[in-house]
Amino acid sequence: MSNYKHIIWIFIFLLGGCSKPWNSPYPAEERFNNTVYSSFADRPKHLDPARSYSANEWIFIQSVYETPLQYHYLKRPYELIPGVLEEMPQVVYLSSDGSILDKSQRSEAKFTEYRLKIKQGIRYQDHPAFVEDNYKLSEKQLNNISDLRDFKKTDSRELTANDFVYQIKRLANPRLSSPIFSLMSEYIVGLNKLNKQLKDVPKDLPLNLNNYELEGAKATSRYDYTIKINGINEQFMFWLAMPFFAPVPSEADVFYAQDGLIKKNIIMDWYPVGTGPYMLTVNNPNKEMILDRNPNFHGELYPNSGEVSDDKNNLLVDSGRELPFVDRIHFMLEKESTPYWQKFIQGYYDRSGIASDNFDQAIQVIGKGQTELSDYMKDKNIRLITSDSTSVYYTAFNMRDSIVGGYSEEKQKLRQAISIAINEEEYISIFRNGRGSPAHGPIPPGIFGNKNDFNPYVYEMIDGSVVRKSIEQANQLMNEAGYPGGIDTSTGKPLVLYFDTTASSADDQPRLDWIRKQFKKIGIQLVVRPTNYNRLQEKMRKGQIQIFELGWNADYPDPENFLFLLYGKNSKVESGGENGSNYQNSEFDQLFDQMKNMPNTSERQKVIDQMVEILRKDSPWIWGFIPKSYGLYHEWLQNAKPNAMARNTLKYLKINPELRDAYRQRNNEFVWWPILIVIVGIFFVVRRLAGRSAK
């Protein structure tokens, strides 16, 4: 029997001797590594900067590649600053013969030329593409290569202006099918011509883009290049902060064009090569993806200014220090939210969003829709950071409709009454757990042009507080619109309106019932017509729709990217544009044409104010809400600030590994006594059986 006792004591000893939490998903030797732990849910499809147009891909791409411009990490409204450029691009306006125009002649410009100067001394990560011997691999050599790490010879070289020009040419490469080629061919001079030339090259022949000229992109020296676009487009500058305009060395295309490597999936879409702070060293999308510090990174300094609140929130402690702070970012595959959440609570992920299933555990309501971090989270020293998104969700009226459309005073008042009746504050509280704020116009916070004021046609100021107008006021507007009590005075019949939506599941029914009740408050009978997205789009194109809901996420942080949704020339019915409400107001359109290419000055703000006032009065939209992002951060993750526009923010994060390890030890203690009870029970059962056998 003594052997059984020895086994029990050995087991207890092993449990007590664990050097790391028993349930850690990471190797013990990583306990104190300077690593950020994160996750991904979907496999990145493209890591080639000419092909990718997805946020879940850009988090990797913009850690490896650098762009000419980038967004200031801390400042709001969002501000463009140099990335790998020495300074902001010089903008020159040209006549049709190429002569430079002065500012007073700007409106006559046939072309705009951006003159860009890159920093000297920037080097690429070490990569086999920079070793000529790796271009012609024998069959034997290929047999010993399964991924990029198997190459023994790697090298680097300095970044040059031609690398930026080369990447712009890649946008025209028909073999890559860049998602922005169609748009950029309207802007960049000669891009469409280059695309036609490249289409003529037989597919079995290699493409060397260095052999082709592009009028709209030229290197003028080793460190200088120009981009020439048609006409004037102030928003083009924002594209220079996107990966499409990151530099790509031509050597990479030559290297990855080898058939033997393509068959092994060793391609640029899988193994990017850049000058950024990190390198993608592990790409195993069925398990993990790892970014490691690029030892060749030229260095960049943490910002020394931001918003007023940043100093208070300890976001300027590292001002002027060299980036990046973290050596590795380790992404684990997590397809389900529940295991991810559990690992975050255990300390195995450094930050987390909040899924609906976990909201009550993380957040508590303190009255009037206001929320704060739950005591459970506070006890774990987890902090909550909220931020407004650069998105707007709205309900639109088809302005071509005979009932809800039109521009008469009566039609305006009908739409204003409906806007008052739909209580967005209540909607946000019930259906979004308080994660949002009512919109007062088309421009969300954080975007130039938003003045953080209120819509006087829907809200009013009472005792210093902005409150939604009453249902009595909405009913008065219904009377003035010719629908007292919801009855059409011209026909004597109840007013019936139709709402088309893609929401059709059982889970959507409570929300749809709530919407019906909002209209009923002012006597309107609402008929909800569920449909699929394609059918909804078809009805919008044909104008066979009355009321519908949509959302818009910013492509770039400029008011033009929101106000164009109501520009007359973008009418969905007339031009197939993004103006789904088919709103057309000549005064608004004239102001839009004036505003879209103005710099962000007080003069531009005045024009925007006029435009917003017109929209509020006409009410082509029920302005809806601005989503609010909720993020949870462990105390050891520092310098964290949500940035809705930038995807190159990993370089700013800082970790305290010792603090993290202490948390993991506290929150993952192995509860061994139930197992001990089971073992003791087994011991006595075995002992009894042994006794019986002895008899």
Image (tube, grey):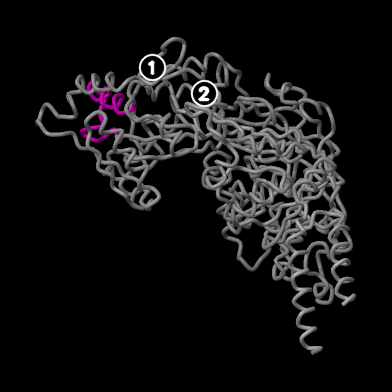
Q: What is the C-alpha distance between the residues marked 2 and 1?
A: 39 Å
Name the one closer to the observer, 162 or 371: 371
Q: Which residues are magenta?
A: 399-419
Label 2 residue SS: helix
Quadrant the C terminus occupies: bottom right
Residue 124 visible in the current orientation: no
Q: Is residue 388 toward the left or the right of residue 350 in the image?
A: left
Magenta stretch: includes residue 311: no
Q: In this rendering, which labeled residue sits more in front, label 2 or label 1? A: 1
Residue 597 visible in the current orientation: yes
Q: Is residue 331 toward the left or the right of residue 491 in the image?
A: right
Label 1 residue SS: loop
Question: Residue 108 shows which numbered tag?
Answer: 2
Q: Is residue 526 above or below residue 423?
A: below
**Dot 1 surroundings within 10 Å: few (below 14), some, or many (20 or more)?**
some
Q: Is residue 596 toward the left or the right of residue 687 in the image?
A: left
